[in-house]
Image: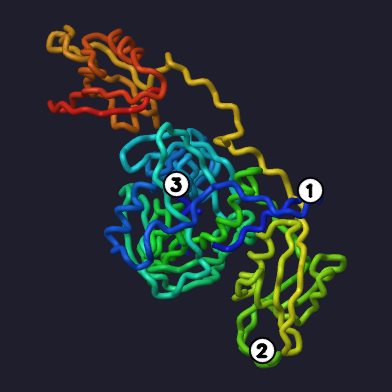
Amino acid sequence: MRWIAAIAVGLLSLDLTGQSGRAREPPPVWSGAPRHAKGTAGLADLAERARAAVVHVRGEMPDGSAAGESDGDGGRTSIGTGFIINKEGYLLTNVLVVRGVIDLRVRLLDGRELGACVVGADMATDLALLKVTTKRPLPVLALGDSASVRVGEPVIAIGNPYGFNHSVTAGIVSAKERVVDRASLHEPGSEELYSFFIQTDASINLGNSGGPLIDASGAVIGVNAAFWAGHPLQPAQGIGFAIPINMAKALLPRLMETGTARRAYLGVDAQPIDPALEAALKLPSGRGALIASIEKGSPAEAAGLEPGDVVVTWNGADVATSEDFKIDAQLSTPGARIKIALLRDGKRSDREIIPRAAPAKEVAPRHPSSCARTPEPLMANVDDFDVQETPVRGGRPSGAGVTVTRVTDHSAAAQAGLRIGDVVLRIGKSGVRVPPDVAQAMGSFKLGDPVPMLVRRSGFDFWMAFTRR
């Protein structure tokens, strides 16, 4: 298994204070309405409408850290994809794209680059909510309903595989409710990661992580997360996985409010139903979660559940497997009243269960790019590059531009493409003849302004631009 390391079911957002039984409205983090009728748009139309809301996510990894996919430049940059879900600047991506990174930035389809921060992250589901600040409304993607997805329906994936920005691939939904063994990650805590995916044959590669999987209505049904590479002697193709978007929708209000997603506790152990158990228990099908044990004093015991019960629905939605039940249970809001249906001795009955908050194992440290951190002041007098007068034969200055002698790694100028040996001819409307001209020209731009610069390289002149920081 090769994992990319580098994101409407009713939301259970009841008041948890115990002072009121009235439901709170979740914050308007996303739009759930598709922008056009299902089946009326071709793939080219879908891609054209969606690409503007897909972004390239990049962050720097401190020395010694282990984060997502590398851009190949010394392994110090984590790269991936994200997509905007709110015109105010909220976007979804994978945790593994942003885990532990600093100087987090996103690049839009139009080339604009914006600073970003982490609103909240949930490692178990590999979902992270980011925020960017912009003066203009941003294009968004609507979030669909992954529970209603059908095997065989067409989908497109948009991302930045291997640095090929905003690549679009197409395929179908190959399977739903695909359970994958994530122990192959060989990472601490991998046994606690969720492994319930939509499988697709739309091409997903390194750099696609965090991008959207989009259905024929233009709505996001999944967050691309992984692909199966197979064995070196038996390589696989067309086996990709996406996190169901309903999982993200269940977590978004909590990520917005607290930055984390506290888990719920039922106090049960459940197992899948194989054909032998289906026959032995005289069940109508192998779908559902078979209860193996109930903890004393647990919410499950209070609800009247017993070993041997088979849970078949959760708040009206079908329970496909024990993994499905595990996700529904743990991602539910503590204190919410959940309606479940179960089979016992061949008869169907309804129960109400009220999950409790699971005890927190440990307090996660604040993300280095957290939106809750006080931003460090930007230093106007720190430049991304150094220059010297450009010599000509005989060692005398030419008077035509200055030569770049140093470029700060991963700086805005470096990301724009500036190299040692380039000759800077103009910055904005100001001509550059000697090094002091650079400082004067840069000083005419405010922090955050785009800076156009005319550069000569190998006898050719061209423009580049970067943001003044």
- The residues bearing labels 1 and 2 have C-alpha atoms spaced at a distance of 40 Å
Residue 283 - label = 2
Mark 3 residue type: Ile
Residue 15 visible, this angle: yes
Residue 291 spot, x, y in % from top left: 74, 77
Question: Which residue shows up at 28% across the image and 9% down it?
Answer: 437
The residue nearer to you, when weighing 60 against 155, is 155
Residue 17 - label = 1
Residue 419 - label = none
In the rendered view, tell whether residue 54 sits above or below residue 337.
above
391 on left or right of 375: left
Q: Nearer the viewer, mark 3 or mark 1?
A: 1
Residue 27 spot, x, y in % from top left: 59, 46
In the rendered view, tell whether residue 25 sits above or below residue 275.
above
Question: Which residue shows up at 39% across the image and 72% down it?
Answer: 153
Mark 1 residue type: Thr
Which mark is first along the chain, 2 or 3?
A: 3
290 on left or right of 302: left
Crowd class of label 2 (few under 14; some 14 to 19; many from 20; radius 10 Å):
some
Residue 422 spot, x, y in % from top left: 23, 24
